[in-house]
Image: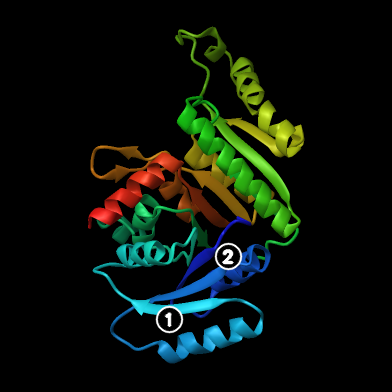
Amino acid sequence: MQALRCILVVIDPNLPENLALKRARLISSVSQSRLHLLVCDTRQDHSHYLDRLRSELEEQGHVVTTRQDWHENLHETIIAAQQAEGCGLVIKQHVADNPLKRALLTPDDWKLLRYCPCPVLMVKTEAPWTGGKILAAVDVGNADMEHRTLHSSIINHGHEIASLAEGTLHVISAHPSAMLSAADPAFQLKDTIEQRYRNACKQFQVEYDIPDGQLHIEEGPADALIPRVCHQLRAVVTVIGTVARTGFSGALMGNTAEVVLDALESDVLVLKPDDVIDHLEDLVARR
C-alpha cells in the first residue's frame, strides 16, 4: 500500500458519516497518495460539498482532487474514474441491501467487487484500526500458481495494514471435512488434513513472523468460518481474495467475498490476481 499513487474515495453526501474518507486519510497519511474524491450523482450539484472536503483535507496536508460524475450505473461510474485517474485502491462505504432486494437484483457493491480492476476496501464500521486485529483469509488447499500468488498478496496486504495500524495479523484457512472415501489418505482423517494445511502455511508464517496462535485452521465452509473467526477476534479489517475466471460471462468471481461481505463485522479488503486485473482492464478499455 505504501506504493499507492492515488486512492479513489467514493463519497455519498447522503450518508451521516464519511467512513470511507476516514480510512482514506489514514492510508494516505502513510502512503502519501493523492485522494480523488468521487460523488456518483447527476441529479444534484455537490460541488460546494466537495470543495469543502477538499479544503479540509488540504489543510491536513493531503493532495486532493474531486469529481462528480455518472455513467449508467454506480459500479461503472466508479470504475471509469478509477481507470481515468490511475487509482490503485478504491475505498467505499458499504451499505447492505435488504435481503429481498438482494435476492432479486445483484447489489452494486457486489458488481464493484467483481469488475473493479484494482483492490477494493469496503468500509463497514467506524471502529479505529489502531491496535486492532487484521484477519487475512487464504485458501491454502488450492496450491496452483494463481492461488499461491494471491495468497502472497493477501498476507502481504494484511501485514502492511497491521504495520500501518500497529495491530496484529491473524490468518485463517478453512479446510474440508474428512472423507473415508477420499483417494488421498491425507484427506481421510481430520488431524492429517489440518496438519497438511498448517504445513502449507509455514512459509508465510516464517516470512511474516506469524506465531501458531495467530494461525486459525478450521474445518468447514469458508463463507461461514471467516465471519465467525472475525467476530471472535473482533477483527477491524478482513483481507480476502478472489480468483476470477475469464472467458465466460465476462468475468466471474468466486462468490465467497460477496457472500461474506454483509456477514463480516469488519472492514473488508478484496484483492484479485494480476492476470485477472489485466483481463478486467481489457474489458473496461473495450467499452
Question: Circle 1 — which element?
Answer: loop
Residue 230, percent from left and from top: 61, 48
* Residue with the mark numbered 1: 14
Label placed on residue 86: none
Q: CA distance from mark 1 to mark 2?
A: 17 Å
Q: Do residues under tags 1 and 2 come within 8 Å of each other at their CB atoms?
A: no
Please say if 56 is above or below 208. below
Residue 131, percent from left and from top: 75, 58
Q: Amino acid at mark 2?
A: Thr
* Residue with the mark numbered 2: 125
Q: Amino acid at mark 1?
A: Asn
Please say if 142 is above or below 88. above
Residue 258, percent from left and from top: 41, 49
Q: Residues within 10 Å of mark 2 (few under 14, many from 20)?
A: some
Residue 240, percent from left and from top: 52, 45
Q: Residues within 10 Å of mark 1 (few under 14, many from 20)?
A: few
Residue visible at 47% across and 62% down?
87
Residue visible at 76% across and 37% down?
209
Residue 232 visible? no
Question: Circle 2 — which element?
Answer: loop
The tag earlier along the polypeptide, 1 or 2, is 1
Number of marks present in the image shown: 2
Looking at the figure, which quarter contains the N terminus?
Answer: bottom right
As rendered, which of 176 and 133 lies closer to the eye? 133
